[in-house]
Amino acid sequence: MTRYAMVIDTKTCIGCGDCVVACKTENKVPDGLNRDWIVEATSGKYPNLTTEFRSERCNHCSNPTCVTLCPTGASHLWKDTNIVLVEPGMCTGCKACIAACPYDARLVMHPDGYIDKCTFCHHRVEQGLDPACVSSCPTHCMHFGSLDDPGSIVSQLLQNRKHKVLHPETGNEPNVYYLT
């Protein structure tokens, strides 16, 4: 299985939201819905506060409970990779995948009612391109590539920088990393 990952540098992300707009445009996401979003997290105590911006989305886990718990098989892995997709025609809208996802990365597409999510722009990846969010980032804080290639930018960044994932305790083995 090819393991794709996204690495986001929280030191250079400014929370501008260009990634959100690029995703909505590239994937024709309806108004009022988002496949990715910006989180502003503040930690510490005054006057020693730290603010971190994170672009969040589906984590395309190596052990995706959303796929395991989908009763119809609509949630599935794409072409022997960790990229999780949803087949709208197979999705009944039961929301089992929403309950299974610790990242709140699933959304109900209105008016059709099927569940949707970030796809790492698999249609672009198939052409050798980065996801739209990565390509549009004005600070170049987002990186995409294969974890199986030790020379890839994502492998190099993870080898050389401190990083974290969200909710590692779930066992889902997320593949969106945040450089700290």
Image (cartoon, grey):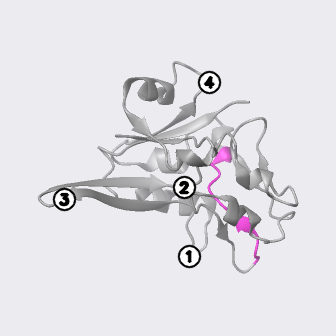
- The front one of 51 and 120 is 51
- What secondary structure is found at the residue carrying circle 3? strand
What's the residue at 76%, 52% (across, down)? Answer: 67
User: Which residue is labeled 1 in the image?
Assistant: 31
Q: Is residue 134 left or right of residue 110?
A: left
Q: How packed is label 2: few (under 14 Cα within 10 Å), some, or many (20 or more)?
A: many
Instruction: Give the extent of the magenta segment.
Output: 112-123
- What secondary structure is found at the residue carrying circle 1? loop
39 w.r.t. 129: above or below:
below
User: Which residue is labeled 3 in the image?
Assistant: 45
Q: Quadrant of residue 150?
A: top right
Q: Earlier in the sequence, mark 4 or mark 1?
A: 1
Give the amino acid at mark 2.
Arg
Give the amino acid at mark 4.
Asp
Report the residue that reaches farthest toward the bottom: 111
- What secondary structure is found at the residue carrying circle 4? loop
6 w.r.t. 115: above or below:
above
User: Which residue is labeled 4 in the image?
Assistant: 148
In space, the residues marked 4 and 3 are separated at their CA atoms by 40 Å
